[in-house]
Amino acid sequence: MKKLAKKTVVIVGGGLSAGLVARQLTARGVEVLVLERGGDRTQGPEARLPSQRDELRWDVNQGLIQDWSRETYTARHNSSEQAVPVRWMEAFLPGEGIGGAGNHWNGHTWRWAEYEPRLRSHYLERYGRQAIPESMPLQDWGVSYAEMEPYHELFEQLFGLSGKAGNLKGQRQPGGNPFEAPRRTEYPQKPLEITEAGVLFKATCEALGHHPFPIPAANSSGSYTNPDGQKLGPCQYCGHCERFICEASAKGSPELLLYPVLRQRKSFELRSHAHVLGIDYDARSKRARGVRYLDLRTGQVHEQPADVVVLAAFTMSNTRLLLNSRIGRPYDPATRRGVVGKNFCYQANASIDLFRKDHWFNPYFASGCTTTAIDDFNNDNFDHRGLGFLGGGLIGASQSGGRPIKTRRVPPGTPAWGTAWKQANADWYNHAMTLTILGSCYPDHDNYLSLDPVHTDVFGQPLVRMTFDFRANEQRMLAYVGARMKAIAEAIGGDAIGPLNANIAPFDTRNYQSTHITGGTVMGADPLTSVVSPHLQHWDAANLFVVGASVYDHNSSYNPTGPLAALSLRLGDDLLRYVARPGWL
Amino acid sequence: MLGHPSSDPPRRGFFKQLAVASAALPVGVSLVAPGTASAASASPAAAAQVAAPDAVLGYQSFSATEAAFVEALVNVMCPADRFTPNGVDCGLALFIDRQLAGGFGQGARRDLRGPFAAAKPQFGLQLPLTPEQHFKAGVAAVNALLASRQQQPLDQLNPAEIDRLLHEITSTPRVVDEIDLQVWFNELVYPLFTQACFSDPLYGGNAGKVFWKLLGYPGLPATNALNVVQFRNKPFPGSQTPMSIVDFS
């Protein structure tokens, strides 16, 4: 093993979080090394026409996704079962390569509700001491929305967000989301174009007294230059966002907006094909000495010393690195003690298809965020007294592409093959729309991550084992919000309305739901219930930091990118202070 | 030429059918020689002087028995009708063969390491088989099931009998020679069938973009910044003449 020259800050994982942390640090000349297991995809067939538009290669066969033959996850529904490896994961899609999952995302970018970083306190204040079930370890994050707001704003400017403010400094704005957390400024760009499905949904929701709005998008509605001088082109509504790299430079992506800037900076270095095996940890001095990584081009293992180590890998990988490096106490569901792996959450989603011969929906005219939505039944935007659950869901008319292998809607009862099947596809492909719920998912004592006792990755290290199912809270939430969505579907009306398809218990790894998995290395003010401090500093190593959706104490219905980006930028600023004067932040 | 399978002899020579599938592709585009089209577009005169590479029309993965099975299967699942030619002529059998012979069939990027244990279906297949091995084991198991009922192999059945058999397989759990036929069909065969129909013609299926035309899917290049406004709630003319990766290669 070769010992390399020491670096000031080493960041594990070359995705969105790492790019944002590095941006803040290298702007002030702090030395940063990013280690990314994948390569540079910006010049490959995945990023160029015509090969970019290959549904079979990039979508069905997961051309941009983690190589499951090298590393997968084992899974079980509760801690009494034996876990098995998921040999081909469909439920969520970790990225690989510079930019990480940020290169193949749809672009939904939310500020979470103002009360979410203190969700436990919020529920107790609103509904009383019995509000939170004993099985649900909700906890406050130890950070406030007000502290994160300037970083939300910076990220939205960096990624050129398209949207419509609903709450400017507490003033409601027509056309925006009235439930939005207060913003100091309008979105950098106007919203994306509305789809025909959005037009129908908007009119119906307004008639029902709901509050429809265009969802905030990291898909560029126009030509845009960000504060770093990086440019976005206008979105072409090609319907190839999620699972694809945008060849039109129109999707806010780390490899487009962050890494080209970083590469120009003298104090920045990126090593690709560097698979980090673990953190070298000195338990006596409670310090991380650096990391060990495998160079996937040569097979050689290198020891990389560092003053500061930042874990900025995917949710699962951050947790796995801590567990495999034996840093922090692993969570034990039997005693409910320990912290690493706890509060693992996902997202509870559902959909209804609508068929209307009198409308042309043209599903292929889409970006990842051509969605008109309502927040009226989301999170705690409605009164939960007597409902028997907490949380909620975003209901929207979402249209993100008409890619023909996987996006063909046919009415219930359509045969699976033959002439009648073709007839239904011909009749309805351009005449169907979908309503969706993206639902919150709160922690449960028996949903957690741990090391698998049997299965290893191809390098011999234990795999992460996920113990997860949708528990009663999420099932009740989806039943309630699903009924609200069904009422909207019936009000829109149609030649046929499909059933409520809910991704609910038992959790099914064969169906894509979202890549929004959270928790495992949660943040908080109490070292007994959190892995990292409110400044993302590991309680057992002052020079080790963890950032990403793995620090979330619960998952909202919104996707995790917004707070993740805000926390990453804030961490970059915190590390400037730490590097100047090491100690507890 | 594109008759209903019931009018065809039970086991047609698949090379003959592949020639038909190939003929359905645009002129100058070979199924397996992607360099041909770009060479031709670079210099038509030069291309005329260079002999075109032979079109490779054999199956890479299937045995004759397997080919007959799959051809009969896709011709039932995709009969010749007012929408498309029969499944073989749409390139569906060729697509499935190529997928099984290639990375997908060989288990690329799929975890196939032991130990193996039975698990709930929600955690996905737990088999030491590659998708190609699994596919072939299922073909043999279906024919074994038929043999146990004193019936001929699947390709010898008439379309109505095959259709009934497929409905039985998809609706009734049954394990034959260690292969769960319902899982085999629903999680391996059926996805391959829909991919064969709707993927870019680059991979040998969806010949002549017949399935994209059926849907009204315009394909490439999909630069729709103006179309999304101009054709909101209107039929999009581009969906009548879809373009594929092959057309831009």
Image (spheres, coloured by chain):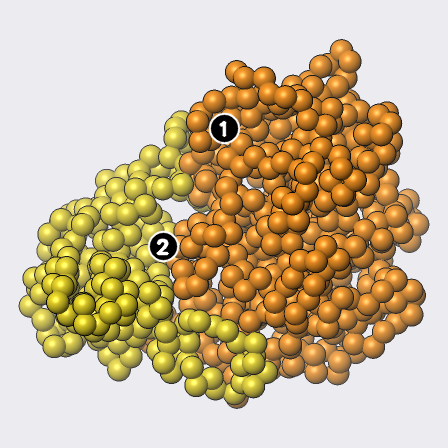
Chain colours: A orange, B yellow
Say which amino acid is labelled 1: Asp
Disc 2 sits on a residue from what chain?
B
Cα distance, mark 2 to mark 1?
A: 40 Å
Which residue does the image show at 22% across and 46% down from the upper left? Answer: B136
Q: Nearer the viewer, residue B112 or A439?
A: B112
Query: Residue A229, image x and y in percent?
Result: 70, 58
Q: Around disc 2, counting alpha carbons within 10 Å, would you say few (fewer than 14), some (14 to 19), or many (20 or more)? A: some
Disc 2 target residue? B186
Are dots 2 and 1 on a single chain?
no
Q: Is residue A147 left or right of residue A60?
A: right
Of badges 2 and 1, the one in the foreground is: 1
Q: Is residue B18 left or right of residue A39?
A: left
The image quarter containing residue A486 is bottom right
Disc 1 target residue? A295
Q: Nearer the viewer, residue A244 or B167?
A: A244
Q: Secondary structure at mark 1?
A: strand
Q: Is residue A503 left or right of residue B221?
A: right
Query: Residue A304, image x and y in percent?
Result: 62, 23
Q: Secondary structure at mark 2?
A: helix
Which residue does the image show at 44% across and 43% down from the upper left? Answer: A88
Q: Is residue B150 visible?
A: no
Query: Residue B204, image x and y in percent?
Result: 26, 62
Q: Quadrant of the C terminus of chain A?
A: top right
Q: Around disc 1, counting alpha carbons within 10 Å, would you say few (fewer than 14), some (14 to 19), or many (20 or more)? A: some
Say which amino acid is labelled 2: Asn
Query: Residue A361, image x and y in percent?
Result: 53, 79
The image quarter containing residue B162 is bottom left
